Amino acid sequence: MKNSFENRTGTTCSQSGTYMCKLHPAIDEVVIKGNHFPRCRQGAGHDTNWILMG
Ligand SMILES: [Zn+2]
């Protein structure tokens, strides 16, 4: 599915945009191309896959 590709915490972002945590759709982060994907901030935080929202 082209528009729901995943981006693991710690990997380099190749497309700037707003991403949501795969496990917590209410958590979103703006990630800029060239930056690393962050950890989700839910609870104590966790590694996740980020899904591009737009
Ligand atoms: Zn999460």
Image (spheres, rainbow, N blue to C red):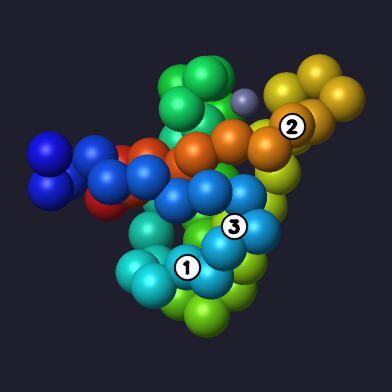
Task: Name the residue rendered at 53%, 70% in the picture.
Answer: 12
Q: Residue furthest right?
A: 44
Label 2 within 8 A of ligand 1 by Cβ: yes
Q: Is residue 41 positioned above or below 44 on the image?
A: below
Q: Quadrant of ligand 1?
A: top right
Q: Position of residue 22 (x, y in %)?
A: 46, 27
Q: Quadrant of residue 44?
A: top right
Q: Pointer 3 and pointer 1: residues touching (CB < 8 Å)? A: yes
User: What residue would you read off at disc 3?
Assistant: 37
What secondary structure is found at the residue carrying circle 2? loop
Q: Earlier in the sequence, mark 1 or mark 2?
A: 1
Q: CA distance from mark 3 to mark 1?
A: 6 Å
Which label is found at residue 46?
2
Q: Circle 2: is it few (<14), some (14-19), or many (20+) Cα within 10 Å?
A: some
Direction bottom: furthest residue:
34
Q: Residues within 10 Å of mark 1 (few under 14, many from 20)?
A: some
Task: Assign a secondary structure to mark 1.
Answer: loop
Q: Amino acid at mark 1?
A: Cys
